[in-house]
Amino acid sequence: MERLKRILKLFWVAGLGIAIFFIGVIYGTITVGVPYIDPTEAQLAYQTRHDAISQWILLIGLAVFLIGLFYIPIRIWMNRKS
């Protein structure tokens, strides 16, 4: 039981990555959402800028999640060694 608690404590990094990823999804849905039918240049620039921001948030969330997944076995291996 104690070992399970230690392993679950390591999942916070992966959980943070998932949270950041979903924040990117929500941000992209709110700001870009449904594309305009006949956008002006200003609307197109707004949509392009916020689409790029949401994609960066998604990539950062995915990267943090993957780092968290790789961190867990490394941390378990380091604890076994000591």
Image (cartoon, helix red, strand yellow):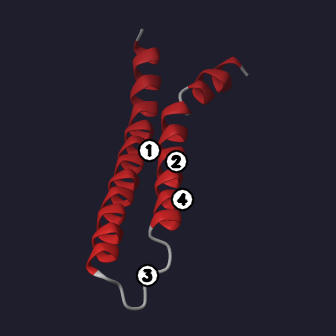
Nearest the viewer among 16 and 36 is 36
Nearest the viewer among 3 and 27 is 27
- The reply to whether callout 2 and callout 1 are in contact (CB within 8 Å) is yes
Name which residue type carries label 4.
Ile
Give how far apart the Cα atoms at labels 2 and 3 are. 26 Å
Q: Mark 1 or 4 closer to N-term?
A: 4
User: Who's the residue at 30% across and 63% down the image?
Assistant: 49
Q: Which residue is mark 3?
A: 35
- The reply to whether callout 4 and callout 3 are in contact (CB within 8 Å) is no
Q: Which residue is mark 2?
A: 18
Give how far apart the Cα atoms at labels 3 and 1 are. 29 Å
Give how far apart the Cα atoms at labels 4 and 3 are. 15 Å
Q: Position of residue 8 (x, y in %)?
A: 62, 29
Position of residue 6 relative to residue 71, above or below, is above
Q: Mark 2 or 1 closer to N-term?
A: 2
Name which residue type carries label 2.
Ile
Name which residue type carries label 1.
Phe
Position of residue 44 relative to residue 50, above or below, is below
Give how far apart the Cα atoms at labels 2 and 1 are. 6 Å
Q: Which residue is mark 4?
A: 26
Name which residue type carries label 3.
Pro
Task: Identify the image quadrant of the N terminus.
Answer: top right
In this rendering, which labeled residue sits more in front, label 1 or label 4?
A: 4
Q: Secondary structure at mark 2?
A: helix
Q: Mark 4 or 2 closer to N-term?
A: 2
Q: Mark 2 or 3 closer to N-term?
A: 2
User: Who's the residue at 26% across and 79% down the image?
Assistant: 41
In this rendering, which labeled residue sits more in front, label 3 or label 1?
A: 3
Outermost bottom residue: 38
Q: Residues within 10 Å of mark 3 (few under 14, many from 20)?
A: few
